[in-house]
Amino acid sequence: MDDIFVIGGGINGCGIARDAVGRGLSVTLAEKGDLAQATSSASTKLFHGGLRYLEYFEIRLVREALEERETLLRAMPHISWPMRFVLPLSRDMRFDTETPAAKLLNRVMPWMKGKRPSWMIRAGLMMYDNLGGREILPGTKRLDLAADPAGQPLQDRFAAAFEYSDCWVQDARLVVLNARDAEARGATILTRTEVVSTIRHADHWQITCRDGEGLETRHEARLLVNAGGPWAADVLGRVAHVNTREKVRLVRGSHIVTKRLFDHDRAYFFQGTDGRIIFAIPYEQDFTLIGTTDQDHPDPETAPECTDAEADYLLAFASQYFRRPVTRDDIVWRYSGVRPLYDDGASSATAATRDYVLTLEDTAAPLLSVFGGKITTYRRLAESALEKIGSALGVYQGPWTAGVPLPGGDIAVGDVPGAVLALSARYPFLGGAEALRLFRTYGTEAAEVLGEAASASELGRDFGGGLTEAEVCWLMDREYARRAADVLWRRTKLGLRVTKDEAAALDAFMAQRAAKRQEETGS
């Protein structure tokens, strides 16, 4: 019997599994699809405090997230790195009228008519700089856009900007590396394994799972963790047969990826006349990521899609800033994810809290449910979950994950550029761009992926976009990849670079390899 059984292989489920097993608890995690297949691979891919949440007076959430940025950066400098954000200033910038800050200002300073003056933005950024402490990331500064390269892609009406710090993260890889580390410490990770039913006893749960081949297995655990994300309510009702007053608010966030719109490595923070904000971020070296929207989503079984209306909204929003209008012809990919926010009764999807709520129901065998949360605070969420789990199970080992590197992240933040150059020198056939991609994917494990290869041909079959047979086999053997989409859209983003025929060939290769391995092992 395990101590804990976790339902859900997103960032919260994998983060909790890793923390728990590191405290000496036995853990099994089941995910009905691929790891990070839903929300956790469809974010805006930022470790950030959430500058706009200050307008909702979410001070504790912002402080916690800001404190986490550098903690996480140190643990995974290969898949996360510092990024500077340029916030152009304009006279027509306004508050979202639904925010508590806007409502307060309308009462106290009605003559401002909801506008965001530059002095107020600077005050907010000063708070952002100092609320969570900084050691690695530089603080805010003012830019003259007429002289700074960040001004070149923008319309002439933008003369000044503030520049501040946050961090980029490869979200789906973050999930997989947490799962890998959990497994290395003793957890059992089951992908493509759906929990179909549970039976709750006085002192344990009996869990029935079904894998992709239809094979059913039974597990027992002292405590059940519901980290189902958008399906959390379904897990409670249909699977665990538990009634609760807690609700999940499903909010769809859509993004577009375009051809590269600017030549520097900084991101933009754009404020709209409707009070909302979007980001325009350098993406995968040759592209620009623009997002996000906030729309209520009907139910978790309806696949989220970036609609034409949402894409047009993002295009129009960005075109209010860029010198050259951004059009549908620039779009190379769209994606959308459902954020399972805690339903706090907010009047709009934008206003709904990004904070997390953990509920422990222990009338019989304990059940912990996770509602809401954001990727930046996943580790702190896991620590909070383990406090409740430890209390329920009588286990009181303290937190340990702060500063402990994830696989491939055992390198100082400042040493990453030199490590990329060293990788390029060791494997000169790669080229600088490919060496950078591999290090930002695998970190110090990149050399294990490449092995003793002295030429590209020694890495095996070329599937396009720089993806080789050696890399695919690594991902299948070490990172739970089973299908082409796992490799092209979650373990990497090489789906942006391969053709449909190349993707189909990759899928066929992976299926044949998996079948051969199954035949050899008899399992």
Image (cartoon, rainbow, N blue to C red):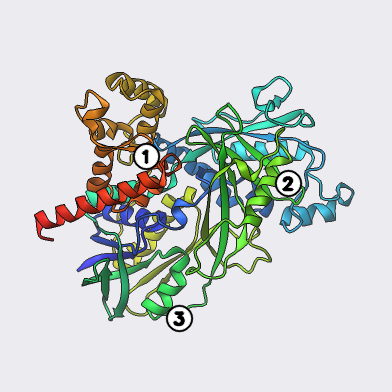
* Residue 339 seen in render: yes
Measure how far apart labels 2 and 1 are at the Cα level. Answer: 37 Å
Residue at the far right in the pictured view: 111
- Distance CA(mark 2)–CA(mark 3): 41 Å
Query: What residue type is disc 2 on?
Result: Gly
Left or right, 270 with respect to 239, comes to right
Q: Is residue 126 left or right of residue 208?
A: right
**First in sequence: mark 2 or mark 1?**
2
- Pointers 1 and 3 in contact (CB under 8 A)? no
Relative image position of residue 231 (x, y in whole percent) = 44, 68
In the rendered view of the protein, which quadrant contains the N terminus?
Answer: bottom left
**Mark in front: 1 vs 3:** 3
Q: Which amino acid does label 1 sit on?
A: Gly
* Tag 2 secondary structure: loop
In three-dimensional space, the C-alpha distance between marks 1 and 3, rounded to whole angstroms, equals: 38 Å
Q: Mark 1 points at which residue?
A: 403
**10 Å neighbourhood of mark 2: few (<14), some, or many (≥20)?**
some
Q: Nearer the viewer, mark 2 or mark 1?
A: 2
Residue 468: x and y, percent? 29, 36
Residue tagged by mark 2?
A: 272
Q: Residue 56 carries which label?
A: none
Q: Which mark is residue 243?
A: 3
Q: Position of residue 320 (x, y in %)?
A: 74, 41
The reply, left or right, for residue 448 in relation to residue 126 is left
